[in-house]
Amino acid sequence: MSQMTVGDMAAHFMLRRHNVDLKMNMTQLTEELASGRTADVAEHLGGNYSYLNDIEHGMNLLKGYQTATGEAGIFTGAMQTALETVQVQSSDLAADLVLVASSAIPSVLNSASADARTQFQSLVSALNTSVAGRSLFAGVDVDAAPLTTGDAMLADLRTALTSAGAASVGDVQAVLDDYFDTAGGGFETTGYQGSTTGLAPFLLGEGESVDLDLRADNQAFRDLLKATAKAALATDATLGYASPMQADLLRGAGEDLLTGQSGLTAIRADLGYAEARIDESKARLATEKTALEYAKGELIGIDPYETATRLENAQYQLETLYTVTVRMSRLSLMDFM
């Protein structure tokens, strides 16, 4: 019977190949043990990717919904902060105007009107707030500030009052109403510079969205701006109104600002409801993501104890191979004989 032998060179290559295979196997087992997931998904699933594809598709959808929900949360939070500024400043101004309107002292009236001018600028600035480079109250035209400057609006109103020859409180109110409330009036043509198209709803999940269509041309904001402008122009030197008329304008402005608080409160309440829905969606999406991650882990996960045993066996085989290799390399003719 003939005996097959392996030459030295062939034996060398066999040992080398076995060494490489063992090292690759150890590397794969080490990665699997560290990640808790199989490194060879195709073999682990037997080539059936359908369930895994469904899970990963769901996770991609969730990622998109989470991004949109996060943006909606940032938007609503910034809107609520801006409107809080508007409400605090306008309500404080209202109380001050009603209080000082009973005074006939010109310096007191001038001071109150000057404060109203400052607050008008602040209201405009709050409504022109942007977050991450996107205007909050400009509709789809997020790259533009929704309102022109406060100085520009007051200048337009001053010109309109002068041109109309407004000489009474009623005349002043008529000019202000025409500017802020008339379709195609000064506010719509030069004051408001945003879009008349609202933002598209933010998607919060499958078949669920939240509408944040809140623009600076909302009637509640117009009312507050109109009342504040009335107080700001009450003691304007160019218009030259007498002290009794100035006091009446300041009192009327204060009362209008108090009345306008209800509309602003309603807007903030609706915004608060939207914030609550967004928070609920964030929690739901996080739960769904956890569930999908768990399902994926169960699908392509490995048994850590089994993997550790296989890794230990592979390490033992590699050590044995090194021992055999060392002994073969030291083999002499005397040892062979």
Image: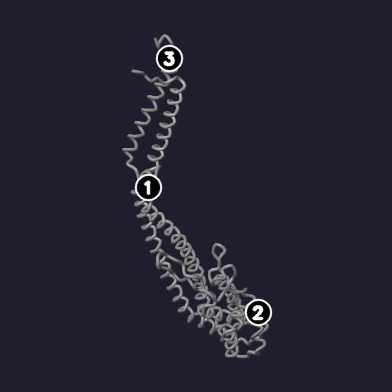
Residue 109, position as x, y percentages in the image: 59, 81
| Tag 3–tag 1 contact (CB < 8 Å) | no
Inspect this view and state whether residue 91 appears: yes
Q: Nearer the viewer, mark 1 or mark 2?
A: 1
Answer above or below: position of 103 versus 142: below
Of 141 and 214, nearer the camera is 141
| Residue at the disc numbered 3 | 331
Q: Residue at x 60, y 69 (%)?
A: 144
Q: Quadrant of the N terminus?
A: top left
| Tag 3–tag 2 contact (CB < 8 Å) | no
| Residue at the disc numbered 1 | 47
| Residue at the disc numbered 2 | 155
Name the amino acid type tagged 2: Ala
Residue 28's image quarter? Answer: top left
Q: How far is disc 1 from disc 2 in space, using C-alphas?
A: 74 Å
Q: Residue at x 53, y 85 (%)?
A: 252
Name the amino acid type tagged 3: Leu
Inspect this view and state whether residue 104 appears: no
